[in-house]
Amino acid sequence: MQDEVTPRIAPLLPPQWGQAELDALGAAPGARDFVLSNWQSDPRGLHGLGVMLRHPAATKAFLTFNNHVSAVGTIPKRTRELLILRISWLRRSEYEFVQHVVLGKRFGLGDADIDRLQVGPEAPGWDPVDADLLRAVDELNADARIGDATWAKLSATFTLEQLIDIVYTVGCYEIAAMMFKTLGAQLEPGVCPLGPEARARMYGGREPGG
């Protein structure tokens, strides 16, 4: 398995965006407006969007899905970020993981949570619901299915719509991880990469926590 992600295509930057790119980004107006307003001072997310915009029509379809997950889905924002961080960790998508550490902390995850989720649901200190959420991600990653026991536990806390949004969230950001890694999205200037210990765990060729 290749560890480091090398660039394959250059991202399209805002000065290069034409009508097709802006139309695609209209499916996720929050992301579009953040990037357009901040790309020179806070360029987070710029390279990820920029490589995807090499195919505007497909990106518009994906961003329609992504906007549901990230902006109008039924699960709490902290829950959403916990799921995204776990699947991006399992997929060794440093680009995605680093971007969502910022969002995870904004919505209530602490440094200890960020460290523990790298180990997984069996790490000591998790609230039982958080552990089951991580277990659901691991099961989806391994078997494309939340197991019966985990589903039953989560059903005691989440509605059916929320359970479906849990699956959609994991699937959406697994697609994003595939895209970022395949196209070689690089961290933007000023965005800090993982620290040496976390990078060794992510790229060490072993299962998280192993």
Image (tube, grey):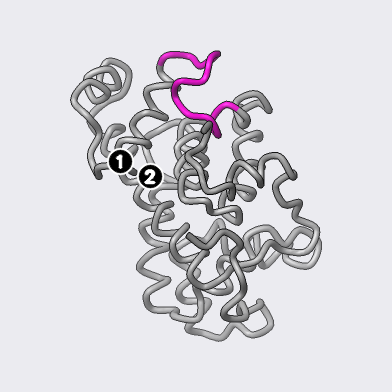
Count of numbered labels shown in the rendering: 2
Q: Position of residue 141 (x, y in %)?
A: 34, 44
Q: Are marks 2 and 1 in contact (CB under 8 Å)?
A: yes
Mark 2 is surrounded, within 10 Å at the Cα level, by few (under 14), some (14 to 19) or many (20 or more) other residues, namely many
Left or right, 145 with respect to 208, comes to left
Q: Amino acid at mark 1?
A: Leu
Q: Answer with left or right where residue 161 lies relative to residue 8.
A: left
Q: Is residue 12 magenta?
A: no
* Residue found 40% across the figure and 70% down from its top: 60
| Callout 2 amino acid | Val
Q: How far across and how far down the image is residue 58, in percent?
A: 37, 74
In this view of the protein, which residue sits in the foreground, 13 or 93? 93
Residue range (magenta): 116-128
Place of residue 20 in the rendered image (x, y in percent of width and height, measured from the top left): 47, 83
| Residue 140: assigned label | 1
Identify the residue at image location x=38%, y=61%.
Answer: 64
Mark pair 2, 1: CA separation? 8 Å
**Foreground residue among 176 and 41:** 176
- With respect to residue 126, does 176 lie above or below? below
In the foreground, 71 or 201: 201
Secondary structure, magenta segment, majority class: loop
Q: Nearer the viewer, mark 2 or mark 1?
A: 1
Q: Quadrant of residue 188?
A: bottom right
Q: Secondary structure at mark 1?
A: helix
Q: Note whether 80 is above or below 100 in the view shown.
A: above
Q: Position of residue 206 (x, y in %)?
A: 50, 43
* Disc 1: CA contacts within 10 A as few (<14), some (14-19) or many (>=20): some
Q: Residue at x 53, y 14 (%)?
A: 124
Assess whether residue 120 is covered by the magenta stretch. Answer: yes
Q: Is 50 displayed left or right of 42 in the figure?
A: left
Q: Secondary structure at mark 2?
A: helix
Please name the residue that numbered disc 2 is placed on: 170
